[in-house]
Image (cartoon, rainbow, N blue to C red):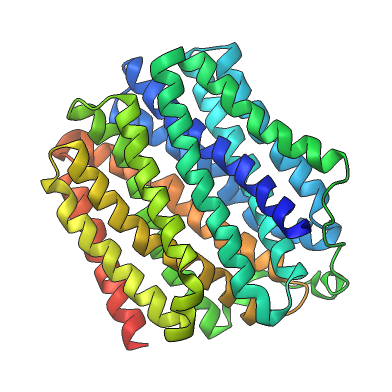
């Protein structure tokens, strides 16, 4: 029951995050924002998480998961609420920074809590359950945002999304969640730095694969609102396409127990990278909502299979007392791409269109998949 509540808290915060991310992009486009402006907004969701990811992980190791969860959930709530109260473009930049930072703090703490509360033999299965919850939230958030915008407007959509992290914070304040205490091994690593972790060869490989897959995920989040708007899709259709992607991640994660029995973690990660690369080769040829939905669904199958394997590998590889730090390092790397890539994507697509972006990312993923396969 406790694990269910932890996953439910993660679902609520992440649903708000994904919904706000879509609503921010669409409102900025409605107010005349260019693809570069959308890139700046997406980058702002990652710049503070990039800078604070490792520190947040170490903080979680030292103080336990409860305080980081409270802080993270509160920031997500505040970020979602602000555009409902002040519906102007400049506020969206502050919203982007707040929800990105809050989601990072909450996510690192939740991932660490699941890993610490799981026996080694159950860890992959429990992370798969958490990943299923994240798929549900990725499905629900954009869907709520899209339909709320079409039927009630942007202010109501942001207000509805703000309720979700508020419920998670209230549950935590009432003491409903039993969370792991501070790690007794954390103090042994006070003088260590992230270079100590990066000396572990397998961890470097995991981080490389995770970063490549994060690039694939970030590009999909970035381009669907822009590309959908360019070909005349409504907010509901765009939200449905994003929801189809999330549904695929859910379905593949439901099958993870069967997949894990037949393939190793590295086999799953390598195949996922090649699937993502193949889909980005095809995306420029999509001309309507149904084609975009099909490609997004297939992309979700590839990306959804990878995350539980990455999380299980991280907890298996790193020393005791440093799991939060390793998760923070992974978050830092992922958010580094989320800072730089939307700016690059926005600048390139504004001048050359989306096709060069799709194909260059596909080439990088293909090269990375070849490397991990050879390794």
Seen at 26% across and 45% down, the residue is 293
Q: Splitting the image into 4 quarters, where does residue 320 fall? A: bottom right
Task: Please tell me which residue lies in front, 340 or 13.
Answer: 13
Task: Please tell me which residue lies in front, 258 or 86.
Answer: 258
Seen at 75% across and 46% down, the residue is 69
Q: Quadrant of the N terminus?
A: bottom right
- Please count the marks in the image: 0
Q: Which percent across, then down, holds residue 113?
A: 74, 61
Q: Is residue 165 visible?
A: yes
Seen at 51% across and 75% down, the residue is 257
Seen at 21% across and 37% down, the residue is 289
Q: Which percent across, then down, holds residue 117?
A: 77, 68
**Image position of 318 (left or right of 16):** right
**Image position of 122 (left or right of 186):** left
**Image position of 321 (left or right of 266):** right
Q: Which percent across, then down, holds residue 260?
A: 48, 79
Q: Splitting the image into 4 quarters, where does residue 194 fall? A: bottom right
Q: Is residue 223 above or below residue 279?
A: above
Q: Is residue 239 above or below residue 47?
A: above
Task: Please tell me which residue lies in front, 375 or 26.
Answer: 26
């Amino acid at each position: 029951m406790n694990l269910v509540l932890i996953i439910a808290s993660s679902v609520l915060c992440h649903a708000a995050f994904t919904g706000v991310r879509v609503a921010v992009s669409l409102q900025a486009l409605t107010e005349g924002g260019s693809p570069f402006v959308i890139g700046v907004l997406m980058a702002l969701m990652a710049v503070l998480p990039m800078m604070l990811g490792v520190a947040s992980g170490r903080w979680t190791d030292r103080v336990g998961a409860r305080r980081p969860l409270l802080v993270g959930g509160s920031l997500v709530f505040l970020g979602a609420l602000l555009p409902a109260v002040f519906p102007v473009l400049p506020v969206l930049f502050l919203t982007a920074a707040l929800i990105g930072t809050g989601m990072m703090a909450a996510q690192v703490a939740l991932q660490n809590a699941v890993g610490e509360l799981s026996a080694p033999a159950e860890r992959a299965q429990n992370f798969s359950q958490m990943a299923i919850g994240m798929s549900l939230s990725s499905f629900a958030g954009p869907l709520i945002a899209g339909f709320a915008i079409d039927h009630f407007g942007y202010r109501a959509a942001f207000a509805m999304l703000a309720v979700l992290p508020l419920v998670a914070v209230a549950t935590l304040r009432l003491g409903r969640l039993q969370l792991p205490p501070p790690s007794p091994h954390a103090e042994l690593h006070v003088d260590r730095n992230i270079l100590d972790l990066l000396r572990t060869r397998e961890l470097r490989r995991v981080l490389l694969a995770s970063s490549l897959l994060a690039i694939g995920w970030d590009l999909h989040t970035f381009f669907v609102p822009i590309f959908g708007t360019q070909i005349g899709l409504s907010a509901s259709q765009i939200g449905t396409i994003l929801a189809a992607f999330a549904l695929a991640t859910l379905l593949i994660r439901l099958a993870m127990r069967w997949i894990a029995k037949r393939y190793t973690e590295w086999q799953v990660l390598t195949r996922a990278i090649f699937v993502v690369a193949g889909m980005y080769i095809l995306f420029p040829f999509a001309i309507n909502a149904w084609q975009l939905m099909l490609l997004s669904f297939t992309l979700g199958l590839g990306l959804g299979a990878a995350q539980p394997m990455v999380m299980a590998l991280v907890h298996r590889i790193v020393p005791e007392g440093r799991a939060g730090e390793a998760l923070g390092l992974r978050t830092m790397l992922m958010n580094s791409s989320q800072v730089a890539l939307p700016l690059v994507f926005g600048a390139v697509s504004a001048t050359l269109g989306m096709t060069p972006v799709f194909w260059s990312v596909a080439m990088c993923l293909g090269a990375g998949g070849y490397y991990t396969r050879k390794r």
